[in-house]
Amino acid sequence: MNVKDPARAVLFALTAVLLWSTVATAFKWSLQTLSPAQLVFLAALFSTLFLGIVVGWQKKLHLLVSTFLQRPLQFALLGAINPCLYYWVLFEAYDRLPAQQAQTLNYTWAITLTLLSVPLLKHRVTRPQWLGAALGYFGAVIIATRGDLLALQFDSTLGVLLALTSTLLWSIYWIFNARHQADPVVSLLLCFIIGTPWCAVLAGYQGALWPDDWRGWLGAAYVGLFEMGITFILWLTALRLTDSAARIGNLIFLSPFLSLLFIYGLLGEAIHPATYIGLAFIVCGVLAQQWRRN
């Protein structure tokens, strides 16, 4: 029986949110010395090692084979999506767009998830959820065009398309991942064991695997640990300790706003007013999708 500790749950959740808020800055900083494919491979490698240590410490390594054999084709698909395809598309978007645009557009994945649940999970979308989707994607257009809606001029049209495609991939990953009840850390490690070799093939095909600059190693280690590894464990711990998953879940709304502070303070990007306005629309859209009638 799990012992609930709401105070510690909030502490773990806030730590995860704070770390997730730094990763957009880390992505952009790392891409100064690494190609997107290199960053995917090295970050996935660091994350695989970390998750392997965690699963070993939990004495669950013996579950890897049995968990995989339950759904081998599904894990093969999930591993190809995360970490390989999803992060490669996302980092390509970051390579083409200002960090403030890429991270905020990527935040619309929660809206994409709701829409995809209709054909894939046969869920029914309510009117508030349709309204939320409209608000969210209107916010995305505001951000992508820097508020110049009539001109529809983007910093990088391909970058915007890649950022939105990443939301599609992430939503597909979580929809298929939600269909089984296996241990979440073991499942994530399996995905990384399967996906990391594909990341290596992609990086090797596009150029060098290993960076010459120490900053590349540092950036990849940070992304692998704090985007793909440690924060996941912190968030799961928070959910296990809390007596209200909704209260913990709402803390994630702090992340995009904190992220803009790091982007401004550490990257020196001037945050365009349209980013704040668009982000407000996106957050309102996500909140509207969570609304339920009593």
Image: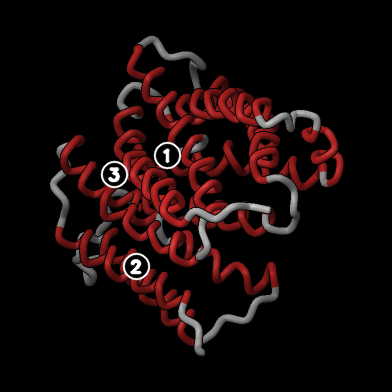
**Quarter residue 29 falls in:** top left
Label of residue 283 in the image: 2
The secondary structure type at the circle numbered 1 is helix
Q: CA distance from mark 2 to mark 3?
A: 18 Å
| Residue at x 77%, y 33% (from the top left corner) | 64
Q: CA distance from mark 2 to mark 1?
A: 24 Å
Residue 282 percent across, percent down from the top left: 34, 67
Compared to residue 66, the image places residue 277 above or below, namely below
Residue under pointer 3: 99
Residue 268 percent across, percent down from the top left: 15, 38
Residue under pointer 1: 92
Asked if marks 2 and 3 touch (Cβ < 8 Å), the reply is no
- For label 1, the crowd category at 10 Å Cα-Cα, with few meaning under 14, some 14 to 19 and many 20 or more, is many
* Numbered disc in front, either 2 or 3: 2
Q: Amino acid at mark 3?
A: Ala
261 sits left or right of 288 in the view:
left
Residue 273 percent across, percent down from the top left: 15, 60
Residue 169 percent across, percent down from the top left: 56, 52
